[in-house]
Image (cartoon, helix red, strand yellow):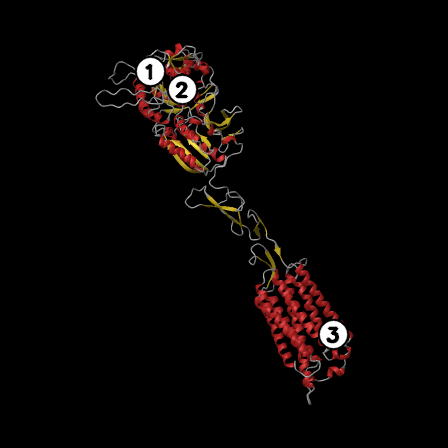
Amino acid sequence: MDGDFIIGGAFSINYKENTKIYNYTSMPQPPSCTRSINSRELQFSRAMVFAIEEINSNTELLPGIKLGYQIFDTCASVPVAVHVMFQLANGRDPVFYKGSNCSQSGVVMAVVGESGSTPSISMSRIIGSFDVPLVSHFATCACLSDKQQFPTFFRTIPSDQFQADALAKLVKHFGWTWIGAVRSDSDYGNNGMASFLDAAQREGICVEYSVSFYRTDTRSKIQRVADVIRRSTATAIVAFVASGDMKFLLEELARDPPPPRQWIGSESWVTEPGYLGYSFCAGAIGVGIQQSVIPGLREFLLDLSPSKVASSSVLTEFWEDAFNCTLTKSVESSKKLCEGNEDIKTLKIPYTETSKFRVTNMVYKAVYAIAHAIHNAACQKTNVTTQCKTETSLKLEQVVAKLREVNISQNNYSVSFDANGDPVAFYELVNWQKSESGVIELVTVGYYDASLPKGQEFHINRRITWMGGGKEVPVSVCSDSCPPGTLKVLQKGKPICCYDCIPCPEGEISNTTDSLDCVPCPTDFWPNIERDACFPKPVEFLSYDEVLAIILAAFSVSGACLAIITAAIFFHHRTTPIVRANNSELSFLLLFSLTLCFLCSLTFIGAPSDWSCMLRHTAFGITFVLCISCVLGKTVVVLMAFKATLPGSNVMKWFGPPQQRMTVVFFTFIQIIICTVWLLLSPPFPMKNLSTYKEKIILECALGSAVGFWAVLGYIGLLAVFCFVLAVLARKLPDNFNEAKLITFSMLIFCAVWLTFIPAYVSSPGKFTVAVEIFAILASSFGLILCIFAPKCFIILFQPEKNSKKYVMNKK
């Protein structure tokens, strides 16, 4: 259609080029298309015509100016698209101008198209050299945003850079970290998938496979792509495929449908109504161009009568293919003659899908953007009216400049371009849902708005139906998430999404899912069984409420009572020969020291404190030395008493009661000095033992100075050995009642207990160290009291006839 300003149009109305073989003997013919109508692209071209006619009838936008159009079929082919661009750029002037000022009367002001990215790249390179703007409605390749290469390229559809980001966020949102990837082997598919894979990598998503194909590939190659999908382990598949290519893949998959797969589609095919019949794709989800309503367009598209159709070769071809009839009688045609009562409204094809417009609205917006750019370049607004000049030559540079400034709203949909010629990205999230009648329908379930703050772009506001009609989100992971208490360890030679879950090392936790490392617990804390939290370590010491402590305390108190009872028996029978013969003063002192020995073991039970730590070791050391000193005194008395019976011996005057008391005091005083030096220089103190057990704290008394502790024990051992030697020497003295024998047995038990105590003390863990020490004290104390006093008490109580001076003094 002619006009004051011409707008070009380039659409893939037919999707196949007519291939010709040349023998170089005749002039090549211009490229042409085969008969392969794409009704969706026809709708795009008709929408452009509708928009131009609507603008021409508008008295405010371009008053006095009539827009014309030239629409060409590119056959979805680069060679044809290039040929079309040269036609649009050359104009239609019959005269060839040789001067410096070339006529531009026939040059188009702008071009709307193309649907594919690859043809758009070639077209933009050509007409960009002539400053002719190309406004695409469906070319989404992010590469076209490069203003260095494509300075006059604009588009009303968002760039694939935004679509890739939206798809990556969609995949991440549903937890799919192990996916398959299919793409068109074209600029659209390759560049779009590259952008998606970059975004997916940032989101931590792994790709099991990435395969490509093109509609012109052999069936065997497309079959190999289908087989990869069938054999894969990834449940989710991202398909960045052009609409024309997806048809061939779906047809191949329909021959032998794969196991259930969750399809994630790009806007090129996922909103295509013609693909909703593939039931194995039910539950597919993807991003689509926003739905819109264009008043009057539905009526315009469906207002086709046989007479209107006959006036257009393209519409004629469309009509004949749609109704499988012919409008003109031809001998060559096998089709029946159209009857004339065919109704376009009865067809269910993309052309007649007019309930909601998606990409068609992008065509509509592109025409209006060009019209407003022309308006801003050619029209001036006065106080009363807007006047547009048609006689002046409008330069293409002006149109390009004004296109960059366009910011309008048409039918409540904004039209504007950023510095790269791209609009603000807004996508609907669409889902293939099966209706109650069993038909798959396209349902909008959310949206993606790139203008919103980061992290708030993606929203879902409706229930989604998944593959196989499921209500639960399908799982598509290489490895299940690692629960808290474990860490992720990558599997050798596999992507980062394939890993093993290893329990945290001892003493460490992880409290998050898919943790990459574990954190050590603080010193006083230890992990729970699940190793996902730290809890205070249990504090362990020999407490009074434990069975072991109760038993030891009972023996301790029993031993003290036994010593007191023995003392009472001796005191009651203090005048009897057997008591008098065994040095009653040292015996009472020995029983007193044994009582203290029994009771000092109680200081080892309970939580250690500064005073209890110092008291338990010093009290034990001093009382035992007092006890051994008494036994030593009794042994010496036995020896001296035997010597005193020899003729002419007066040895007893050198070891009478005063000397015996001094001996006990002297030996005990040495131990007191040792303990005092120990307490002054480095006394025992309470401490938390964290090394014996990692999972609990042992409260114990640190020795302070190990030298002091072993000096106390060594001194006790030295006295015990000395006493044992003297007792052995006196064991065969000829008295009827020789106390040296009893002392020998008691010292033998004492030394045996303490010799076994040392290794047991060193090797016993935790509170059992204290129990071993208490046991040694009690065992040696019981050994002394039973060996020395039990036989005497037995005679006193049960054999009083032997408790006589005659029996005691009777020699063997």
User: Which numbered dot is residue 794?
Assistant: 3
- Report the front residue among 327 and 767: 327
Q: Position of residue 432 (x, y in %)?
A: 49, 27
Q: Secondary structure at mark 2?
A: helix
Q: Amino acid at mark 2?
A: Ser
Q: Position of residue 431 (x, y in %)?
A: 49, 28
User: Which numbered dot is residue 39?
Assistant: 2
* Among the two numbered marks 1 and 2 on one chain, the one whose residue lies closer to the N terminus: 2
Q: Secondary structure at mark 3?
A: helix
Q: CA distance from mark 3 to mark 2?
A: 123 Å
The answer to whether the residue labelled 3 contacts the one labelled 2, judged by CB atoms less than 8 Å apart, is no
User: Which numbered dot is residue 323?
Assistant: none
* Among the two numbered marks 1 and 3 on one chain, the one whose residue lies closer to the N terminus: 1
The residue identified by callout 1 is 393
Q: Amino acid at mark 3?
A: Phe
Q: CA distance from mark 1 to mark 3?
A: 141 Å
Query: Mark 2, residues whose alpha carbon is within 10 Å: few (<14), some, or many (≥20)?
Result: some
